[in-house]
Amino acid sequence: GGSTSAFTMPSRESASGSVTIQASPRIVSPEYFAALDLRILEGRSLTDTDTATSEPVVVVNETFRKRFLGREALGARLPMALWGQNQQGEATIVGVSEDVRYVGAATTSLAELYFSFRELSVGVRPTTAWLMVRSDGDPAGLSDLVRSAVRDADASLVADSIMTLEDRLLA
């Protein structure tokens, strides 16, 4: 699930020299890919050094690369003004990840862009957040711990709809 954004970017493949793209921007932590066991197929993942004061970077998924960039994804530049926020400038593609399906195992993967939450300007915050937790133990026993950790981090937040990824995909 999640929102999608449309933007225009240069394209050597298009007769007009540009292409309009619709993709789902995701604001994630650098640990996101490891938590979902997603491989980086090309380039690198996001890191703790990707911050609001560093050069803006983005990781795209394999569907985005195939649909819009062909083979040459690394180094391509995308506009930061996605999801209706006032982010200025462009981000450089530094990695390509495997696809993930958020809605269900039978759905087609969406074109996705992954930005580090550390890169966002102060005051630019998403309206919805998903917390992914990876555990070697029984996930059913983590619900109270997750709720407590969220409450401790920010008492105005509510952790609801806690479920395993498998249950989410079957929903």
Image: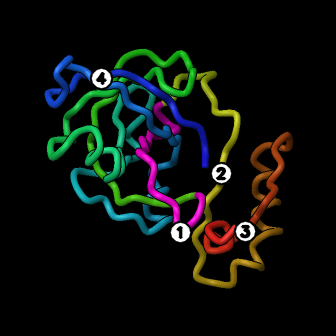
- The disc at residue 105 is 1
Q: Position of residue 128 (x, y in %)?
A: 69, 40
- How is this picture coloured? rainbow
Q: Look at the image and say whether residue 111 sits in the magenta stretch.
A: yes
- Quarter of the image for residue 2 reads top right
- Residue found at x 20% / y 17%: 16
Q: Is residue 106 above or below residue 122?
A: below
For marks 4 and 3, give the CA distance: 37 Å
Q: Position of residue 12 (x, y in %)?
A: 14, 27
For marks 3 and 1, give the CA distance: 16 Å
Question: What residue did someone put label 4 on?
Answer: 9
- Residue found at x 49% / y 65%: 36
Q: Look at the image and say whether residue 97 sits in the magenta stretch.
A: no
Q: Are marks 2 and 3 in contact (CB under 8 Å)?
A: no
Q: Position of residue 105 (x, y in %)?
A: 53, 69
- Quarter of the image for residue 48 reads top left
Secondary structure of the residue carrying numbered label 2: loop
Q: Amino acid at mark 3?
A: Met
For marks 2 and 1, give the CA distance: 18 Å
Query: Which residue range is magenta in the image?
Result: 103-119
For marks 4 and 1, give the CA distance: 30 Å
For marks 4 and 2, give the CA distance: 28 Å
**Which of disc 1 and disc 3 is earlier in sequence?**
1
**Which of disc 3 and disc 2 is earlier in sequence?**
2
Question: What residue did someone put label 2 on?
Answer: 130
- The disc at residue 163 is 3
Mark 4 closeness class: few <14, some 14–19, many ≥20 residues within 10 Å: some
**Which of disc 1 and disc 4 is earlier in sequence?**
4
Q: Can see residue 115?
A: yes
